[in-house]
Amino acid sequence: MQRIILHLDMNSYFASVEQQANPFFRNKPLGVCAYLSPNGCIIASSVEAKKVGVKTGCRVYQAVKLCPQVILVENDPNKYRSVTQKLFGIMKSYSDSFEPYSIDEAFLDLTGWCRDFKQAEYLAEKIRGRVKAEIGSWLRCSIGLSFTKFLAKFASDTAGVDSTLMLPDQASLEPVFRGRQLTDLWGVNRRFKKHLNALGIRTIADLRVFPVQNLFSALGKPGYWLYCHVNGLEIDHLRSLEELKSKSIGHSYCLPRWTVDKKYLSAVLFKLASKVGVRLRERKQLAYGVYVHWSYIGQGGLSKSFKLKKPVYTTDDIFRPAQQVLSRAELSHKVTMLAIGVFNLCPMFKQPELFFRPDLNLSEAMDQINGRYGSQMIYRGLLWKTENLAKDRIGFRKIDF
Amino acid sequence: MYDQINEPIEVLVSFKTNEIVPQLFSWRRKIYKISQVHLVHTSTLGRQTLYHFSVTDEVNYFQLVFNPFNLSWVLEKLYSSG
Ligand SMILES: [Mg+2]
């Protein structure tokens, strides 16, 4: 049977959703910010803003300097999540094999659901039309269709705004790879490119005909995978939800106030730890590892991770080792970003030792109260007056299932 | 930039199939006629789901929120294009 994979990627996602909501923002340079203070980061910009150089990662003050009439709005995660939910709902109605890849990207396996690529192309247009009709007319997406996941993603990356690109067979590959950089390939960063260059591989065409056994011995499995990908050999599949549950849970926060104040940092850290704790308990998992990280102004920072003999489950358990690192550390510069998380996850089991800890039940009871009445109804004294710290934020690759 | 309002309003609404369409609302003793609904999104407050409506009249953008639990409407945000 002809394998048919579709990859859909929304164009300038957060900015387009804001322009969809408010038509007075359309056709204008718009930046969606982490927060609106001068140091706030632009996390997404509209097509019009990109044209004048206002790009992701740009600071608010820089954006205003580049383009004084730029419209800046604070990000609204609920808006984007709602639209994603509707979008994925539409996609899922066309196949039972669906893999969300990020907040605005997903794969759909149409094998067996479409007779051929012609029918798949018709379906792609149907999906695009339904997005406009059922969610919003301003929303645009790139769609790629091919016979492997990798190629479908490459096709949508290449397709351009509001367009579909189909790579239905081997013969269609050579022309689209011509003139493209190695770093245009999914999974090839600058470091990987250097390794390829060292082997004498300069172009995608070089890579396609390179002896695969040499690639394998020089770069290991990633080299072999890449060879398969560019030659249209499928070694991948759409991942089920169970496979997608991430192997770690973490939260980070770019501080609006850069500081060496350990009391403030500790309060933020506890708030982040409590978010991690809630997600860990929602997933009914235990963690055998905790990590903490912070970045200093300029560059550098500190990362520490612990593998633990006894698993952690409560917010206090997660917070304690991280807090120890913070309290003992000599802060060389002002801290700009804090992160904390857990890893080495395993399913929850109530071993006797855990069962007799009253704070376990307390954590679960607190989660229940917050789940029912709002996420900040009941909290620890340490969090008093920190309501505005580490508010809900959204990341591109972070999606919960 | 948006003005945060967060004041209760009275709204005239039509219920269509699987859809709620606010038609006009009164705020600070003025009536605003909604010409178009551009986006509907949801958020949660504990167990309750709230429905946010991004709407415009000829010159203003409004974000209204409907709480089905207590049947209240609030004007959350305002943006004037003029
Ligand atoms: Mg995108």
Image (cartoon, rainbow, N blue to C red):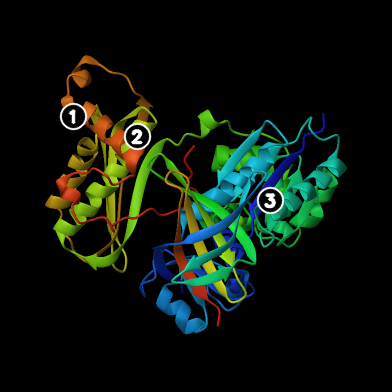
- Mark 1 residue element: helix
The residue where tag 3 is placed is: A134
The residue where tag 2 is placed is: A280
Name the amino acid type tagged 1.
Asp
Instruction: Look at the numbered disc 2 and say if its residue's Cβ is closer than 8 Å to ligand 1.
Output: no
Q: Earlier in the sequence, mark 2 or mark 1?
A: 2
Q: Callout 2: few (<14), some (14-19), or many (20+) C-alpha neighbours within 10 Å?
A: many
Residue A203 sits in quarter: bottom right
Q: Is residue A347 above or below residue A394?
A: above
| Chain containing mark 1 | A
Q: Is residue A352 left or right of residue A106?
A: left
Disc number for residue A79: none
Q: Residue A328: image x %, image y %?
A: 12, 51
Q: Nearer the viewer, mark 3 or mark 1?
A: 3
Q: Is residue B59 left or right of residue B47?
A: right
Looking at the rendered structure, whether the residues under marks 3 and 1 are on a common chain is answered as yes
The residue where tag 1 is placed is: A359
Q: Nearer the viewer, mark 2 or mark 3?
A: 3
Q: Callout 1: few (<14), some (14-19), or many (20+) C-alpha neighbours within 10 Å?
A: some
Q: Quadrant of the N terminus of chain A?
A: top right
